Amino acid sequence: MRQLLLATVLLPALVHADGLTVDKVYHPYVQPLEREMEVRMTSADGEERYRFGLGQSVSDRVFFEAYFIAKDDNNHLTLDAIELEAKWQLTEQGEYAVDWGVLFELEKQQHINAWEASAGLLMAKQWGQWVGTANVTVAYEWGQGINNEIESLLALQAKYRYGSFFEPGLEFYSSESGQALGPVLMGDIHLGQGKKVHWEVGSIFGLGYKAPDNNYRLLMEYEF
């Protein structure tokens, strides 16, 4: 627990950040032979962004996913970027006081030569029916029309495991551009052996004048 608190407090302070992103909070776990199709939508003050992903685990510790990222342009979706993602589970669940993983992402803008690479530390811990998750991410942007810079984001989630079908929670996001806090609901719909739909919906409110006032996020994963 001491390591979890130290990481979430100190790591974001090491780098400059200029953007607040409310999105998925990642857990550090990988399931062997896992495949998934994923759709995500985020909205910040009415500006919508979508991710369509297809993922596959290549071992019991490593999971890869590719995303097509689109934005809403006058009620039409236009492809904005392509992203590759790799998650590496570092420890077995319950092996230590905190479960650890790392996440690597590489994003390329569609219409200009602009890139973003990021690395995130994923942490999770369970207390009875409660589960706490923390993501500390550092990203570097470079390329056409971008000021080369380093950014960081802290994302925290606490959820109550009422049942696999319904888990209420609370999320907090922080960067130099502000903070946001709000409730989330999530759960699993089991469809048979090895198949399920995981869903999440959240309404995250900006704290202070820097962050967007209203942030919404939706997620739907089909695991098979």
Image: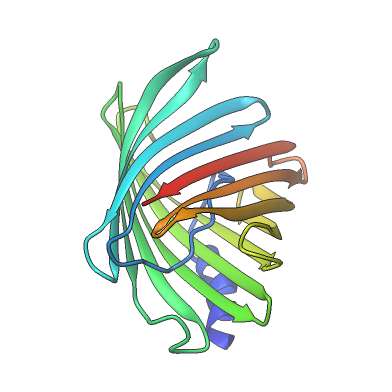
Where residue 221 sits in the image (x, y, percent)?
47, 46
Q: Nearer the viewer, residue 89 or 172?
A: 89
Find the residue positioned furthest to the top: 74
Q: Nearer the viewer, residue 158 or 136?
A: 158
| Residue drawn at x 70%, y 41% as measured from the top left | 210
The answer to whether residue 64 shows anywhere in this view is yes
Instruction: Tell me if residue 127 comes above or below residue 134 in the rendering.
Output: below
Find the residue positioned furthest to the front: 192
Quarter assignment of residue 48: top right
Instruction: Tell me if residue 1 comes above or below residue 160 in the rendering.
Output: below
Where residue 43 sits in the image (x, y, percent)?
61, 32
Find the residue positioned furthest to the left: 58
| Residue drawn at x 63%, y 33% as measured from the top left | 44
Instruction: Tell me if residue 182 comes above or below residue 213 in the rendering.
Output: below
The number of numbered badges drawn on the structure is 0
The answer to whether residue 212 shows anywhere in this view is no
